[in-house]
């Protein structure tokens, strides 16, 4: 449900609220928790050989990076509607394709920003070769995109429905 173009990220209200809640947690309670871990590890003695201290500092660095990413993303976010269920592929949709016209060799993925990447469903950005190739196509149409080796690949759009999470 996200499309990034010209530094603007389009989000549904639900996605915006979810990311905002994550930012609030990381900026508040999570910072407090990591500060307590660092303080406890610091009290254990020599910091050069203190694995707990170094692990906590590394965790803090990753958390602060995520805070910066979310802050930037939300600063440039525009809240929009879920895409229409009109059979046209758009960001925020669950898309099923068949490779090279072979309807047994299929892939189902979410066309969205990497913010939606999860272990549950594969996610392709609208700016990726496959994502840009299928974006705007209708169910039943063929789409072409460029492979990393420079050759072209063709897929057929089998389904496109709004992702409901």
Image (tube, grey):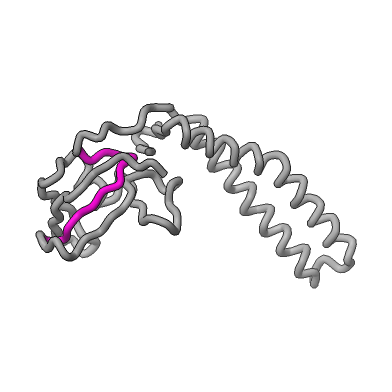
Q: Where is residue 5 in the image (x, y as percent from the top left)?
A: 34, 35
137 left or right of 126 in image: left
> Which residue lies at the image location 80% right of the left edge and 69% below the top edge?
50
- Magenta-drawn segment: 88-100
Q: Is residue 42 above or below residue 31?
A: below
Q: Where is residue 53 in the image (x, y as percent from the top left)?
A: 78, 63
> Which residue lies at the image location 64% right of the left edge and 37% below the top edge?
24
Asked if residue 20 is among those painted magenta in the image, a careful observer would answer no
The quadrant of the picture occupied by the C terminus is top left
78 left or right of 160 in image: right
Tally of numbered discs: 0
- Depth check: give the residue in front, 18 or 48: 18
Q: Is residue 164 above or below residue 142?
A: above
Rendering quarter of residue 67 = top right
- Depth check: give the residue in front, 39 or 106: 106
> Which residue lies at the image location 71% right of the left edge and 64% below the top edge?
55
The quadrant of the picture occupied by the N terminus is top left
> Which residue lies at the image location 42% right of the left edge and 33% below the top edge?
11
- Depth check: give the residue in front, 139 or 59: 139
Rendering quarter of residue 154 = bottom left
Q: Position of residue 41 (x, y in %)?
A: 83, 62
11 left or right of 162 in image: right
């Amino acid at each position: 449900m996200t499309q990034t173009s010209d530094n603007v990220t389009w989000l549904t209200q639900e996605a915006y609220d979810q990311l905002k809640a994550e930012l609030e947690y990381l900026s508040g309670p999570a910072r407090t928790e990591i500060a307590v871990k660092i303080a406890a590890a610091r009290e254990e003695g020599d910091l050069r050989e203190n694995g707990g201290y170094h692990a906590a500092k590394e965790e803090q660095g990753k958390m602060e990076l995520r805070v910066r990413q979310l802050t930037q993303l939300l600063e440039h976010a525009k809240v929009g509607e879920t895409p229409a269920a009109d059979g046209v592929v758009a960001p925020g949709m669950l898309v099923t394709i068949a490779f090279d016209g072979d309807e047994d060799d299929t892939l189902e993925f979410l066309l969205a920003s990497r913010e939606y990447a999860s272990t549950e469903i594969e996610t392709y950005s609208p700016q990726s070769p496959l994502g840009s190739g299928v974006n705007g196509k209708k169910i039943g149409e063929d789409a072409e995109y460029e492979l990393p080796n420079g050759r072209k690949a063709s897929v057929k759009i089998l389904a496109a429905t709004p992702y409901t999470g």
